[in-house]
Amino acid sequence: NAGVMQNPRHLVRRRGQEARLRCSPMKGHSHVYWYRQLPEEGLKFMVYLQKENIIDESGMPKERFSAEFPKEGPSILRIQQVVRGDSAAYFCASSVGQGNTEAFFGQGTRLTVV
Amino acid sequence: AQTVTQSQPEMSVQEAETVTLSCTYDTSESNYYLFWYKQPPSRQMILVIRQEAYKQQNATENRFSVNFQKAAKSFSLKISDSQLGDTAMYFCAFMAMYSGGGADGLTFGKGTHLIIQP
């Protein structure tokens, strides 16, 4: 049973390009959370998704960021027109269902904007 | 909104010693969980221990135990017989639970870098 898979592990984008980060949850998990970790900081909640639904996007910047979790395929965190301040590690976690307190984390995608 | 505070940016102890990492939190919620996560250099977030707020008994997992003081909103992690492999960042985290089974995402502290010296 594979864990939470995130790809790519490292992503380099030039300012103004788009970044797409993928997260495949653990088998049987239908809930996905995205977090951002800036250097020397803890993880900050961004968005919580269930398949085909956004449950809570209160931590997501209002512009340039979007997330989806389609019926088939991985969850995608999309950042348009990246800026240097978007450089961070982005983590995905999955759980069986809402309210399940055991969330399993992926290894993260480190985004570097040059 | 919840806040989680870890006041020790870095700690260093000798192998086999006991070390305690501190965490305080602030919330108006009555039903919640508290967690300690470990993040080694690989960046993988690993759940160390979990405590339900309505349980008075402190959680224990092998060498890891917590001291949960609900009135003081304090949740410290004790690591006994520390090992070199315990070297990592440790994050305290909070999750509010709502009636009907809903839950927020995790709110994390800024972390404590724990170094175990040989």
Image (cartoon, coloured by chain):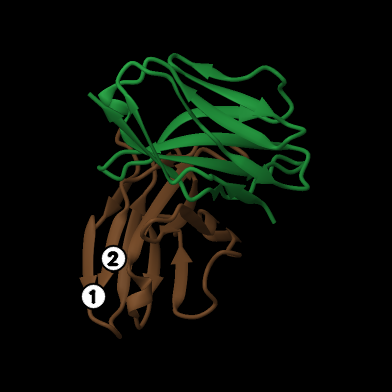
Chain colours: A brown, B green
Q: Chain of mark 1?
A: A
Give me the C-alpha separation between circle 1 and circle 2.
8 Å
* Mark 2 lies on residue: A111
Residue A101, can we see it?
A: no
The relative height of residue A112 versus residue B71 in the rendered view (above or below) is: below
* Mark 1 lies on residue: A13
Q: Which mark is residue A5?
A: none
Q: Are marks 1 and 2 in contact (CB under 8 Å)?
A: yes
Residue B73, can we see it?
A: yes
Q: Residues within 10 Å of mark 2 (few under 14, many from 20)?
A: many
Report whether B44 appears left or right of B93. left
The relative height of residue B12 versus residue B84 in the rendered view (above or below) is: below
**Residue at image x 30%, y 85%?**
A16
**Residue at image x 65%, y 44%?**
B25
- Point out residue A6 in the picture as x, y percentages from the top left corner: 30, 51
**Residue at image x 60%, y 35%?**
B34
Quadrant hosting residue B101:
top right
Report whether A59 appears left or right of B79. right
**Residue at image x 48%, y 39%?**
A103
**Kind of element beneath mark 2:** strand
- Point out residue B60 in the picture as x, y percentages from the top left corner: 53, 17
Report whether A7 appears left or right of B11. left
- Point out residue A56 in the picture as x, y percentages from the top left corner: 61, 60
Q: Nearer the viewer, residue A7 or B81?
A: B81
Q: Which residue type carries mark 1?
A: Arg
Q: Which residue type carries mark 2?
A: Leu
The relative height of residue B116 versus residue A47 in the rendered view (above or below) is: above
Q: Nearer the viewer, residue B5 or A18?
A: B5
Name the image quarter holding the C terminus of chain B: top left
- The mark that comes first in sequence, 1 or 2, is 1
